């Protein structure tokens, strides 16, 4: 999937300014940038939520015009948002198949096959490494934040996502839970999905990313591959200044100085 010279203007604001981007199957692309850099707007264009003001969205070499997020989903482009839209009083199994319920029986007997839904949900989550969820009847509200993300990711992959977009999936999570979600993304990559991870956390990005794009004020200001930039350099690029890295005691040589 590809964005070609995409811009998005809102009244008086240029949220995205002439950005080109390519996503490949089996790769984690990290989109980095401070708050307000234009990351969310860019993925709204990519996932059909908003049309671009200028430029093209290209899937498999063909320019496409998404009328809605549903159009994009039909082509296998799925999004997992920071606040996973799950309902706390719904079971894991029911939530997993929400909107795509497997049915059994005919006519009046036709109803949601919950046993099957539970089985698939638990199976898919286990496969992504979520071992603690063993019963599809468990309520979503009793899952941890990371497990909820896992549920949303497992669902997207199961229903055929070829491109998985995650907007700040670790923003509200602690260290351990973030690790869980990042590990999960590596498993999704193994399934040959193109992953676009949006984050303002450089540590999370360098832990899993294959390629990186840094945005500032709507523009791409840097692009690089795994292993070519140091963590402090990435942080400096994002911040557009040295304040954060100085505060953290980072030196230019990529060393941490804990004093
Ligand atoms: N619907 C909108 N109307 C007007 N301005 C917007 C809208 N959405 C985003 N913006 C502006 O576009 C810029 C980029 O926002 P956003 O894409 O949310 O950045 P990020 O996700 O990197 O924090 C910001 O200045 C924001 O205020
Ligand atoms: Mg955002």
Image: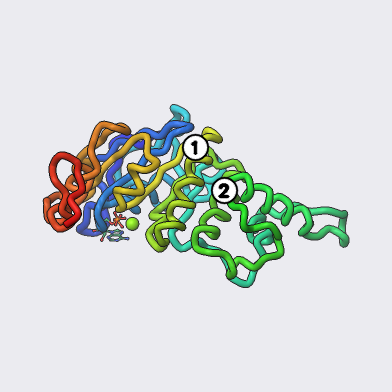
Q: Which of 85/192 is in front?
A: 192
Secondary structure type for disc 2: helix
Relative to 176, is 227 on the left or the right?
left
Callout 1 environment at 10 Å: few (<14), some (14 to 19), or many (20+)? some
Answer with mark 1 or mark 2, whichever residue precedes in sequence. 2
Q: Which of 211/78 is in front?
A: 211
| Point 68% across, 48% down: residue | 123
Q: CA distance from mark 1 to mark 2?
A: 13 Å
Name the mark on residue 156.
2
Q: Residue 147 sits in which quadrant? A: bottom right
Residue 102 shows in the view: yes
Quadrant where the N terminus is found in the figure: top left
Q: Residue furthest bottom?
A: 89
Q: Position of residue 76 (x, y in %)?
A: 54, 41
Name the mark on residue 23.
none
Name the residue tied to disc 1.
Answer: 189
Secondary structure type for disc 1: helix
Q: Which of 154/130 is in front?
A: 130
Relative to 138, is 75 on the left or the right?
left
Residue 17 shows in the view: no
Quadrant where the C terminus is found in the figure: bottom left
């Amino acid at each position: 999937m590809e964005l070609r010279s995409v811009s998005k203007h809102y009244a008086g604001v240029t949220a995205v300014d002439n950005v080109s981007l390519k996503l490949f199957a089996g790769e984690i692309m990290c989109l980095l940038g401070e708050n307000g850099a234009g990351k969310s707007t860019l993925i709204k264009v990519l996932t059909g939520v908003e049309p671009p003001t200028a430029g093209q969205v290209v899937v498999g070499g063909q320019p496409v015009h998404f009328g809605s997020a549903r159009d994009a989903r039909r082509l296998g482009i799925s999004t997992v948002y920071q606040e996973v839209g799950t309902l706390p009083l719904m079971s894991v199994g029911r939530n997993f198949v929400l909107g795509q319920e497997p049915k059994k029986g005919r006519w009046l007997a036709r109803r949601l096959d919950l046993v099957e839904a539970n089985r698939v949900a638990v199976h898919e989550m286990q496969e992504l490494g979520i071992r603690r969820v063993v019963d599809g009847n468990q309520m979503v509200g009793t899952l941890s934040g990371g497990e909820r993300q896992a549920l949303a990711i497992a669902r997207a992959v199961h229903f055929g996502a070829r491109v998985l977009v995650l907007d700040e999936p670790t923003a509200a999570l602690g260290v351990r839970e973030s690790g869980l979600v990042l590990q999960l993304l590596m498993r999704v990559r193994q399934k040959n999905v193109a992953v676009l991870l949006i984050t303002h956390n450089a540590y999370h990005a360098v832990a899993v990313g294959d390629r990186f794009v840094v945005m500032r004020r709507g523009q791409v200001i840097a692009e690089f591959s795994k292993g070519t930039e140091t963590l402090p350099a990435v942080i400096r690029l994002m911040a557009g200044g040295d304040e954060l890295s100085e505060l953290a005691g980072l030196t230019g040589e990529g060393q941490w100085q804990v004093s």
